[in-house]
Amino acid sequence: MSIQFKTYVNCSASAFAGYQALVGTTKLYVALMDATYEANIDQIADSNWGNVVAYDIDTIGSPTNYTVGGKALTGVTISQVDGSPSAEYIMTIDADDLTFKGLTATFKVLVLYYSNGAGALSPLLGYAILPTAITATNQTFTIKWSSFGIIEIVQYA
């Protein structure tokens, strides 16, 4: 199944302000969220991890081989290019495919965020809503990212 990550309203400011910290980071995470989570992409209400952690599948239920906050991405690459004339900068975030082994859980939304060490204040970057909830029972669940990257963030002048 093909899914597309969308950015939260504050994503551009958070990502570009912390660009140097993001380069080579091991602090980008993907969390699995319950089907009751509805992303508020245009609302500041969904600006950081503390606003959405209540929907993490570990907060709501008792998944196996999953901990609250999800899993860190590996092999993270971040490129930033001048997007003139239509945009000031374009940042692309990519990483190795992400695998949850032996996962037992039900989820419908994936949330990408930067764990900045401030816990609840860690900024949300993007999310993907799956067409239907996935129920895994002691399965290997792999997220295969597009060859174009996980997410592209554009900052306009």
Image (cartoon, rainbow, N blue to C red):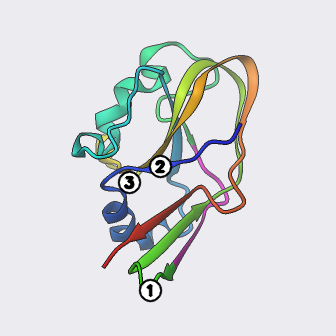
Question: Which structural element holds mark 2?
Answer: strand
Residue at (32% x, 38% y) in the render: 40
How dense is the environment of label 1, judged by Cα within 10 Å: few (below 14), some, or many (20 and up)?
few
Image depth: mark 3 or mark 2 in front: 2
Question: Which structural element holds mark 3?
Answer: loop
Quarter location, residue 133: top right
Query: Reading the chain from its start, which is encountered first: label 3 or label 2?
Result: 2
Q: Quadrant of the C terminus?
A: bottom left
Q: Magenta region: which residues?
A: 72-80
Query: Reading the chain from its start, which is encountered first: label 3 or label 1?
Result: 1
Check disc 1 and report the residue beneath it.
Answer: 84
Check disc 3 and report the residue beneath it.
Answer: 116
Give left or right: position of 139 versus 68. right
Q: Residue 54 carries which label?
A: none
Residue 75: in magenta span: yes
Check disc 2 and report the residue beneath it.
Answer: 6
Query: Reading the chain from its start, which is encountered first: label 1 or label 2?
Result: 2
In the displayed structure, 81 sits above or below 72; it is: below
Instruction: Name the kind of residue labelled 3 in the image.
Output: Asn
**Residue 86: percent from the left, percent from the top?**
41, 80
Instruction: Name the kind of residue labelled 2 in the image.
Output: Lys
Residue 59: in magenta span: no
Give left or right: position of 132 versus 11. right
Give left or right: position of 85 versus 144. left
Instruction: Name the kind of residue labelled 1 in the image.
Output: Ser
Question: Which structural element holds mark 1?
Answer: loop
**Residue 51: percent from the left, percent from the top?**
29, 35
Residue at (76% x, 22% y) in the render: 139
**Residue 53: percent from the left, percent from the top?**
37, 30
How dense is the environment of label 2, judged by Cα within 10 Å: few (below 14), some, or many (20 and up)?
many
Quote the CA–CA distance across marks 3 and 2: 21 Å
Q: Which residue lies furthest to the left in this view?
A: 44
